[in-house]
């Protein structure tokens, strides 16, 4: 069976597909021996890579800046995936399990200052997606509700590398949400138009860090070929809501303790030792920061455009604009606005059925440390370029070689043990064995 000229159809990239493995509904009437479990579709993959960062940062793991999946140098396993899904007719479910370093990275990506609120602290580090679905009109209905944890619909790239043009994920992807937990409503208005509405906890958390909720919407337009793939697709989406903690922990130093009446640290009685203060839990206290839910909002506008003018060529454009209001200081009641924006342009050309070339160029403006979190005092310009050679020896194996250069207007990239430079060049060989 010949390998398709591109690793995935265009419509899987416009926008990020939250359900890449959802099977088509099974015609129950066509098979008298049909059982409900016959409709379940399973898939799996193994994603491994070898990477060199020519800045030679040490230690080997966690020092590749602006990376989500390829966090280590040398040989490494990104993750292993197992997917199962049952199409809504009218009730269905989807579960995606992931095991490996990338699963830990994703599960620890919550916005909260307290990382004990991330998914990794609640036994959810292996659960990429888990949601139930209800489609009142059955398999052919135009309306569907999903409740649970699901991939973000925003952005052009996704976490599973075999579904992208390049092996590594870009700077713009690094700035976008990875997943949401909440309610998603999907409306298939026509073959050309569909839209989604979201009410979720926010970015990258199953257990929320505040009482506020984020609301989102996405409108999708498609022009399809005869085979059902997109010749053109466009998506515009918005997500807005509070992301910061709505409480704040105050730590009290030696000789002081937290006062519930003043909500401040006060001098400890002379008769109370430091150990007594710690044992009684008075070495720190929690105060309300409720205004984060109304004044400290984050807004994201996301645009994805894809085009496939000829069968062997895929073009992808992704542009984002975001703004977040954050407290001027942890103790302040005033808020400052921080904006960020960026764009990614990618393309893949299938030279022959089994060999293709992919390119990606990016620009990102980070004001106030949204992406470069280690330097919130800097307003940083980021540029990225990636050249990918991919080889598809069979329907079940994807091999990609990425050569990537990232550049910043400040020296933010790690070099050696403690050094920093303004650029980062990496070569990454990614190999993914997959069932479909």
Image (cartoon, grey):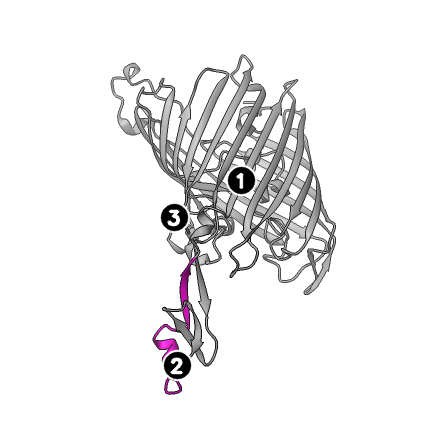
Q: Position of residue 269 (x, y in %)?
A: 39, 83
Q: Are marks 1 and 3 in contact (CB under 8 Å)?
A: no
Nearest the viewer among 89 and 211 is 211
Q: Residues within 10 Å of mark 3 (few under 14, many from 20)?
A: few
Nearest the viewer among 35 and 123 is 123
Q: Position of residue 181 (x, y in %)?
A: 40, 41
Determine the CA span between mark 1 and mark 3: 17 Å
Residue 279 colored in magenta in the image: yes
Residue 15 seen in the figure: no
Nearest the viewer among 245 and 149 is 245
Magenta-drawn segment: 269-288
In the picture, the disc for residue 9 is none
Among the two numbered marks 1 and 3 on one chain, the one whose residue lies closer to the N terminus: 3
Say which element carries label 2: helix
Among the two numbered marks 1 and 2 on one chain, the one whose residue lies closer to the N terminus: 2
Location of mark 2 (residue): 275
Q: Position of residue 119 (x, y in %)?
A: 42, 51
Location of mark 1 (residue): 299
Q: Position of residue 136 (x, y in %)?
A: 30, 22
Among the two numbered marks 2 and 3 on one chain, the one whose residue lies closer to the N terminus: 3
Say which element carries label 3: loop
Determine the CA span between mark 1 and mark 2: 44 Å
Location of mark 3 (residue): 211
Residue 84 colored in magenta in the image: no
Left or right of 302 in this view: 132: left
């Amino acid at each position: 069976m010949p390998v398709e000229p591109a690793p995935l159809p265009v419509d899987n990239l416009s926008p990020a597909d939250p359900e890449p493995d959802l099977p088509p509904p099974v015609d129950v009437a066509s098979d008298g021996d049909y059982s409900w479990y016959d409709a379940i579709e399973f898939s799996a993959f193994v994603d491994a890579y070898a990477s060199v960062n020519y800045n030679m940062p040490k230690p080997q793991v966690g020092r590749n800046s602006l990376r989500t999946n390829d966090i280590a140098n040398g040989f490494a396993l990104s993750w292993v995936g197992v997917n199962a899904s049952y199409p809504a007719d009218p009730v269905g479910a989807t579960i995606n399990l992931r095991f490996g370093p990338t699963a830990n990275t994703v599960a620890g990506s919550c916005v909260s200052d307290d990382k004990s609120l991330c998914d990794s602290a609640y036994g959810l580090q292996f659960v990429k997606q888990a949601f139930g679905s209800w489609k009142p009109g059955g398999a052919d209905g135009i309306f569907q509700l999903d409740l649970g944890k699901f991939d973000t619909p925003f952005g052009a790239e996704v976490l599973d590398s075999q579904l992208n043009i390049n092996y590594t994920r870009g700077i713009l992807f690094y700035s976008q949400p990875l997943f949401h937990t909440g309610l998603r409503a999907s409306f298939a208005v026509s073959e050309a138009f569909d839209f989604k509405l979201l009410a979720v906890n926010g970015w990258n958390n199953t257990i929320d860090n505040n009482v506020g909720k984020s609301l989102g919407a996405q409108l999708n337009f498609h022009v399809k070929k005869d085979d059902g793939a997109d010749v053109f697709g466009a998506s515009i989406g918005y997500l807005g809501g509070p992301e910061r903690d709505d409480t704040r922990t105050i730590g009290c130093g030696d000789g002081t303790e937290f006062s519930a009446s003043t909500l401040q640290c006060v001098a400890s009685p002379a008769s109370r030792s430091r150990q007594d203060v710690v044992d009684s839990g008075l070495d720190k206290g929690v105060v309300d920061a409720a205004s984060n839910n109304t004044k400290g909002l984050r807004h994201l506008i996301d645009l994805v455009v894809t085009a496939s003018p000829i069968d062997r060529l895929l073009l992808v454009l992704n542009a984002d604009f975001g703004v977040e209001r954050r407290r001027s200081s942890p103790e302040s009641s005033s808020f400052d606005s921080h904006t960020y924006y960026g764009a990614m342009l990618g393309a893949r050309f299938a030279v022959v059925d089994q060999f293709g070339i992919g390119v990606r160029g990016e620009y990102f403006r980070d004001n106030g440390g949204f992406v470069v979190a280690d330097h919130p005092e800097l307003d940083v310009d980021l540029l990225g370029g990636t050249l990918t050679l991919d080889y598809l020896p069979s329907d079940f194996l994807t091999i990609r070689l990425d050569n990537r250069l990232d550049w910043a207007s400040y020296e933010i990239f790690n070099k050696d043990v403690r050094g920093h430079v303004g650029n980062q060049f990496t070569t990454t060989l990614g190999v993914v064995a997959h069932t479909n």
